[in-house]
Amino acid sequence: MAYTALGIMFPFGIACISIIFTITIFGIRRWWAVQCYEYDRLNPPGPRPLPFLGNIHQVPMDYQYKAFTEWSKVFGDLIFLRLFRKAALIINSTQAAQDLLEKRGAKYSDRPYFILFSELIQFEPNVTIMPYGDQWRLHRKWIQASFQDRAALQSYEPIQARETNRLLRALIESPGDFTAHLKRYVATLMMEITYGHTVTNLDDDEFIRLADRAVSGTVEAGSPAAALVDFFPLLKHIPTWMPGAGFKRKAFEVREYVRQLQNVPFAKVRNAMAAGIAKPSLLRTLIQDSNVDGFLSPDDEYNIKGAGSVIYGAGTDTTVTVLISFVLAMVLHPDVCQKAQAELDRVLGNGRLPELIDRDSLPYIDCVLKEVYRWNPPVPLCLPHKLTQDDEYRGFHIPGQTMIIPNIWGMTRDVETYPEPETFYPERFEEMDKLNADANDPRNLVFGFGRRLCPGRQFGDTSIWLAVANMLAIFEFRKAVNSANEEAELIPSFVSGTISHPRPFSCNICLRPGRTADLIPVMDYD
């Protein structure tokens, strides 16, 4: 009897399970069809997503900005994606970026929360990834006081002039090491202004070593595999000993590097202040302004350490990338180089080197620099913004919490604004009327948008201009020569990543005829 009962119940159970399974699958398919319908009907256009994955399988591992630019030819300047369950909006046009990120800044100025950086590496407080709020305003206020105040900027000019001269002498002595010299130039400016620390030897400097280890480690830790933790937060709880937890072990390693970068320079500035020998710097000013009866609160100390550590990481790599891109462009385009040098000779003669006061008198040099920014924008995809509430634009619905990703590289390839965009052609800015030249200045793109606009852009731009103008005044840039004494072929290539570094290349940098090291003023470090 029992056997007979089981025989009856077993197929009945199978039938029930089959019915439930069928209904479930039908429900999922129906739900997904509705989702796709709503997706197509309400959101901006984009490639059709798959269940669970969304569009993540369609986004390439490398050179995403190029793929987004190609997609814009199909979907337009707004592309809506699902990255697993997270919504993302790619902005491929300057107009849309201005409409949303600048004119509606109150909604579009937040940042997505990055578990990898904020919880695992703990690179905080970090104004570049900090949520929009009171703490962000405090850090922004501090950096603006140091990098946008006219008096502060003028106080940096002797340091910029000294380091420019030092760069020129280094290039005369060992031109083959131009990448290292450009990096030292930028690193010294950042370190001196932030900590009052002068870098004399790039390879044997404690501050530089700490900063490079923290910054490069953070970049390495942010691999695509590690970034999965931002989509699946449960991954942060994986024990470090488990297979597949390498991303977490690396993050903890980098966390210690970040702590050292925050603590060691801060302690040295405080010790120098106590001894009465501290040079003027951002940290010295912040410590002085925050002191109450000789003491800093734990919150003030935490915020000041973070403010100092982020400046080097945020400004050094991008600035160096622009300068190396400039050298590459001059090697590839000697006609541009010669035209810029003719302007310098006409305005300055050959008896002195250019200074910041000469900038308005050298418009073609400015065109060259604008074209460098456009030709290889140092950050091709802007760090994502986050929409804080639902919004409507051009009849499309953009859900709150959507990641907003401006495709700066794509904007610089707009053929309507920049014809033949892959051609390095500074004259394009001379051929525009002033209104269009100002509106289409690539500096309006490469330094970010809206309330997240880089607060150090003026200092960074003047530092780049000084190096560019002075190198043009004194040096020739030529292709490297091979064993047959022939110019070696040079094809420009840029790495894929957050920052678009030119791949390493060789070239010949030599003094122009009639130029000697005597042109370079000798300046001390006092």
Image (spheres, rainbow, N blue to C red):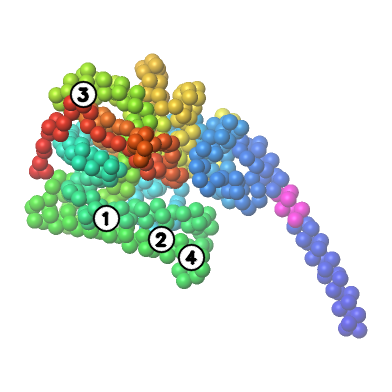
Residue 106 included in the magenta stretch of the image: no
Query: How far across and down, in percent of the image, does residue 217 sit?
Result: 37, 56
Q: Which residue is mark 4?
A: 245
Q: Which residue is mark 1?
A: 209
Q: Which residue is mark 3?
A: 358
Is 130 situated above or below 439? below
Residue 369: tell me if it is visible: yes
Q: Which mark is residue 251?
A: 2
2 left or right of 184? Answer: right
89 left or right of 481? Answer: right
How far apart marks 2 and 1 lie (CA) works out to 18 Å
Q: Main secondary structure of the magenta part?
A: helix
How far apart marks 1 and 4 lie (CA) works out to 27 Å
How far apart marks 3 and 1 lie (CA) works out to 35 Å
For mark 3, give the secondary structure: helix
Q: Which residues are magenta?
A: 25-31
Marks 2 and 1: which is nearer the front? 1
What residue is at 24 percent from the left and 53 percent from the top? Answer: 203
How far apart marks 2 and 3 lie (CA) works out to 47 Å
10 left or right of 294? Answer: right
Q: Amino acid at mark 3?
A: Asp
What residue is at 10 percent from the left and 41 percent from the top? Answer: 524
Q: Amino acid at mark 1?
A: Arg
Dot 2 or dot 3, earlier in sequence: 2
